[in-house]
Image (cartoon, rainbow, N blue to C red):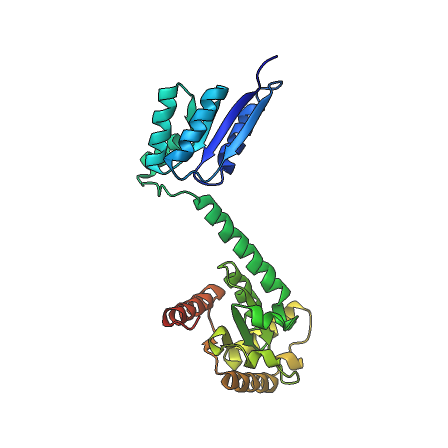
């Protein structure tokens, strides 16, 4: 009876990359009974000594993704002394990148996990922006990193989505004279709320275009100048009552407004407000 073959996966991070690569190779050796043993978060020479001892006893292969230079060198040295095949899965590709792009690698473990965490934070922020868009649920106000307020057509929704891709959880609340704003707006820190304003003529232009796209008459109350002035006056009073920063979005692209807001948040963070 043939002894079961073992491949040891060794990593100073989770070891997912090495495991995927080893499994891809194993598909080319059908019929072989090969066991994969994963040792993650290797941090010192003692860990490597244990793996080397097991690999020697089992006549195994070691496949590793270790980027910390002293640990990599130690593993290579011990494997060579014991006659064990140890395959470095990352260095050849990193060297090619370094030579081609003339840039040195960070040589820090667990960076993939950090990238994954950033990705999932963005996904969570986008889902948050969708759930708490346009005042759908006022409970989002206290949970948000930022709350945008303003009259209709001041880019609240596109701004919320753009900032969500910067990993910010953003809720937005429309301000309408006939609707009392939620109490939560007046209880959150004022620097976590941003008021969006726009000039009456620009808002009139935007709303007329919106009505045109919907196939409605441009004379509708939605684009009426007096109605617009009433809404803007009401919104300004609410913003002053809250005491929040105000950003004028007139003639600005979403990206421009977002950068203004991000700059404000950065200054607040430096001052210790957030």
Residue at position x 41%, y 42% from top? 109
Give the vertical position of 125 relative to 73 (above or below). below
Q: Position of residue 83 (x, y in %)?
A: 39, 18
Q: Position of residue 10 (x, y in %)?
A: 46, 33
Asked whether residue 127 is in view, the answer is: yes
Residue at position x 48%, y 46% from top? 113
Give the vertical position of 99 relative to 85 (above or below). below
Residue at position x 36%, y 33% from top? 72
Answer with the quarter of the image where residue 144 lies.
bottom right
Q: Between 195 and 144, which is closer to the camera in this rendering?
A: 144
Q: Between 215 and 262, which is closer to the camera in this rendering?
A: 262
Q: Between 77 and 211, which is closer to the camera in this rendering?
A: 77
Residue at position x 55%, y 62% from top? 161
In the image: residue 131, left or right of residue 254: right
Q: Position of residue 247 (x, y in %)?
A: 46, 75
Where is the N terminus found, in terms of image quarters?
Answer: top right
Answer with the quarter of the image where residue 91 lies.
top left
Furthest toward the right, the residue is 216
In the image: residue 133, left or right of residue 19: right
- Counting every numbered tag in the picture gives 0
Furthest toward the top, the residue is 1
Q: Position of residue 153 (x, y in %)?
A: 57, 73
Asked whether residue 219 is in view, the answer is: no
Give the vertical position of 69 relative to 262 (above or below). above
Where is the C terminus found, in terms of image quarters?
Answer: bottom left
């Amino acid at each position: 009876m043939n002894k079961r073959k073992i491949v040891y996966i060794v990593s100073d991070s989770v070891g997912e990359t090495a495991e995927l690569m080893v499994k891809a190779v194993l598909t080319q050796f059908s019929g072989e009974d090969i066991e994969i043993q994963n040792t993650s978060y290797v941090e010192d020479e003692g860990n490597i000594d244990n793996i080397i001892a097991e690999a020697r006893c089992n006549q195994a292969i070691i496949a590793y993704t270790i980027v910390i230079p002293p640990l990599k060198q130690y593993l290579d040295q011990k494997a060579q002394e014991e006659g064990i095949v140890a395959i470095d899965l990352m260095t050849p590709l990193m060297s090619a990148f370094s030579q081609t792009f003339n840039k040195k690698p960070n040589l820090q473990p667990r960076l993939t996990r950090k990238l994954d965490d950033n990705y999932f934070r963005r996904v969570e922020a986008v889902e948050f922006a969708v759930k708490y868009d346009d005042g759908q649920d006022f409970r989002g106000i206290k949970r948000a990193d930022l709350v945008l307020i303003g009259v209709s057509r001041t880019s609240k929704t596109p701004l919320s989505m753009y900032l969500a891709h910067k990993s910010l959880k953003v809720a937005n609340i429309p301000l309408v004279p006939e609707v009392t704003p939620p109490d939560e707006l007046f209880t959150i820190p004022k620097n976590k709320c941003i008021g969006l304003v726009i000039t009456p003529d620009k808002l009139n232009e935007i709303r007329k275009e919106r009505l045109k796209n919907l196939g409605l008459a441009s004379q509708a109350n939605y684009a009426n100048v007096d109605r617009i002035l009433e809404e803007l006056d009401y919104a300004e009073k609410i913003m002053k009552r809250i005491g929040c920063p105000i950003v004028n979005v007139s003639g600005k692209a979403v990206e421009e407004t977002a950068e203004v807001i991000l700059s404000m948040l950065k200054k607040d963070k430096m001052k210790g407000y957030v």
